[in-house]
Image (cartoon, grey):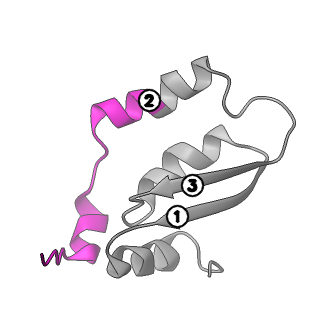
Amino acid sequence: MSLDLNSELYYQWHEPFESVLHFFKNTLLQVGWGQGHQKRIAMDVGCGPGGTTTQLVLPLFPRLEKVIAVDLLPHMIDIARKHHFSSAS
């Protein structure tokens, strides 16, 4: 199977599904994620170009120590690094 999305175009036009927005803005807060004083590690599987991670995940975790972001397409990781995580490895 070959999946070759234009990662730059996807980055410019991608909007998360309403269900994803609801999950991050409501469900996670209701179960207490991001609250408390513990340092946290978050993993975003299928991170794409990183927009959802930086716009929705990071604000929920003010004490976030580390973000692990993975995607099936290496191009998406490249875009995420370029636009959001310039010091990421």
Q: Which residue is mark 3?
A: 43
Where on the picture, by quarter, is residue 33? top right
2 or 3: tag closer to the N-terminus? 2
Q: Where residue 6 sits: x, y (%)?
A: 20, 76
State which quarter of the image contains the C terminus: bottom right
Q: Nearer the viewer, residue 68 or 25?
A: 68
Q: Amino acid at mark 3?
A: Met
Q: Nearer the viewer, residue 62 or 39?
A: 39
- Report whether 16 appears left or right of 61: left
Q: How many marks?
A: 3
Mark 1 to mark 3 CA distance (whole Å): 6 Å
- Report whether 38 appears left or right of 23: right
Q: Where residue 3 sits: x, y (%)?
A: 16, 74
- Report whether 42 appears left or right of 20: right
Q: Which residue is mark 1?
A: 69
Element carrying mark 1: strand
Q: Amino acid at mark 2?
A: Phe
In the rendered view, would you say 54 is above or below 71? Answer: above
Q: Amino acid at mark 1?
A: Ala
Are the two marked residues, 2 and 3, in contact with CB atoms closer than 8 angstroms?
no
1 or 3: tag closer to the N-terminus? 3
Which segment is the magenta one?
1-23
- Report whether 81 appears left or right of 40: left
Image point 50% across, 29% down: which residue?
A: 25
Q: Where residue 83 sits: x, y (%)?
A: 48, 73
Q: Which residue is mark 2?
A: 23
Residue 44 covered by magenta stretch:
no
Q: Residue furthest right?
A: 37
In the rendered view, would you say 49 is above or below 36? Answer: below
The mark closer to the camera, 2 or 3, is: 3
Image point 39% across, 34% down: which residue?
A: 21
